[in-house]
Image (cartoon, helix red, strand yellow):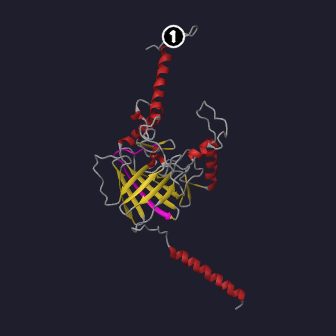
Amino acid sequence: MTSVQVTRVGAAVLALACAATTAWAGPYRAPRTVYGAPDLQGVWSNASLTHMQRPTGLTSLAVSPAEASRYEHENAAKKKHAPVTSDTPAPPVTDSVGQDAEDLYFLPSSDLARVGGQIRTSWIVDPADGQLPYTAAARAEANAAEYGDDHVFDNPETRPFDERCVLGVGGSAGPPLVNPGENAQLQILQTRDYVAILAEMNHDVRIIPLRGRRHASSAIKPWMGDSVGWWDGDTLVVETVNFNPGERWHWNAGDYVLIAEGAKVTERFTRTGSRSILYRFSVDDRANYTRTWSGEMPLRQTAGPIYEYACHEGNYALPGILAGARKAERDVAAASSAPDRPGSPPPASPPAP
């Protein structure tokens, strides 16, 4: 046998050995903690253009790279120095402090999420249309909540929980997890008996006991609900019930997501690679949804760090928000009671009965 033939035989053997090694390796197995549990610890990000519901113009759960690129470019163009309101033009492009404050503060993601090699258009995977399966009554309540967010300033309790610094924007710590427009980092810490999930947004911390599956009394309704967890193989399963009525409305990219007191949210965290966790969840609430609905979200490991989010109850912005609403009411009342200007036409007569 010539040296060339020997070389070719050796290369073939090496290729077969590599293929056999790959076949024998099997599915990914998460590293273990000193307690023997799958290790989910680290800082993870869920920043993405993908959100809870599928946006208009995208018709399927998974899209092609070309479709994704078109959507991502259109989204970037809309956000770049966009008008403040429909009748207020975009601010001028300046660089007075040597940085782009919007990019640094909001940390927007420019990409749709990837799950299992697919480019996803919504976190919701069931129903297939990627939309929240509200009952008619719950849909009307969602519309009212959206209106109230922009128009109801009666007292502090009617303002959203993030404005009051009770929870992070939209309830980003979950359950279920949503991805905020900024500070979209989560740190997972584990002991033998607990898992803690720290959300950078408003420094919310969910503490999940792993000792048994019994919930506290239904009379106790903590913020972020009453969670219990257990291991199912390499997957952390978390079941949450007894949600606080004050967090009834979570929201994500304009979608109002109802998480009522009677809802049950089941989450599954599975480490799928050295730098990835697949997060899956389902929401069971037949009083407000026509069916149980579910979703998937990738969590990507990041170097961090987690920064302080110094928002606290009693913040000075809230009195200013309410004072501004009272000023607007006084201005409307003053305008309606002002005498007619000279030469102004008489008020229109009311329609005949």
Q: Magenta segment: does it hold 264?
A: yes
Task: Please tell me how many numbered marks the rendered image carries.
Answer: 1
As rendered, which of 242 and 31 lies closer to the eye? Answer: 31
Q: Position of residue 108 (x, y in %)?
A: 57, 47
Q: Quadrant of the C terminus?
A: top left
What range is drawn magenta here?
256-272
Residue 249, quarter of picture:
top left
* Residue in view at x 61 percent, y 31 percent: 88
Taking the image as drawn, is residue 8 in sight? yes
Q: Amino acid at mark 1?
A: Pro
**The furthest residue to the bottom:** 1
Q: Main secondary structure of the magenta part?
A: strand
Q: Give the residue number, with chain letter if any, for mark 1.
A: 339
Q: At numbered mark 1, what does the secondary structure look like: helix, strand or loop?
A: loop
* Residue in view at x 34 percent, y 47 percent: 222
Q: Is residue 312 above or below residue 42?
A: above
Q: Position of residue 23 (x, y in %)?
A: 53, 75
